[in-house]
Image (cartoon, rainbow, N blue to C red):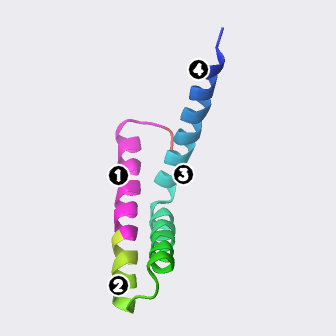
Amino acid sequence: MINRSSFQTMRISSRREAVNRWSARHPIFVGLAAGTIVTLIFVILLGYHAFSDVLISFGAFSALTTLTALGERRRRKRLNLPR
């Protein structure tokens, strides 16, 4: 018999797995989307900045997120997990 807490844990785990699979399939889109969102938050919260500041923020967060998603793709391939 599965109790409620273990069922919720399985459901959360399967959602997390679905997000990981999707980000491994589309690493560049995930990087660009995350960079855009973080940069918009950066501009909205801190006010107007120079274009170079916005570009550096976008590039840094996009690169970081893209590399993380590419790492997830590589991990899934190495462990023979479904893609």
- Residue 48: which quarter of the image? bottom left
Residue at image mark 1: 71
Question: Callout 3, which amino acid?
Answer: Trp
Q: Are marks 3 and 1 in contact (CB under 8 Å)?
A: no
Query: For this rendering, which residue is in front, 83 or 36?
Result: 36
Judged by depth in the image, the label closer to the viewer, 3 or 4, is 4
Q: Residue at x 54, y 47 (%)?
A: 19
Q: Which residue is mark 4?
A: 6
The residue type indicated by label 2 comes to: Asp
Left or right, residue 47 beside residue 78 = right
* Above or below, 61 relative to 27: below
The answer to which of 14 and 52 lies nearer the viewer is 52
Question: Could you tell me which secondary element the residue under label 2 belongs to?
Answer: helix
Q: Tell me the kind of residue under disc 4.
A: Ser
Mark sitting earlier along the chain (2/1): 2
Residue located at (36% from left, 48% from top): 74
Give the CA distance from mark 2 to mark 3: 30 Å
**For residue 43, which numbered disc appears in the image?**
none
Of callouts 3 and 4, the N-terminal one: 4
What span is colored magenta in the figure?
Answer: 61-81
Residue highlighted by disc 3:
22
Q: Which residue is mark 2?
A: 53
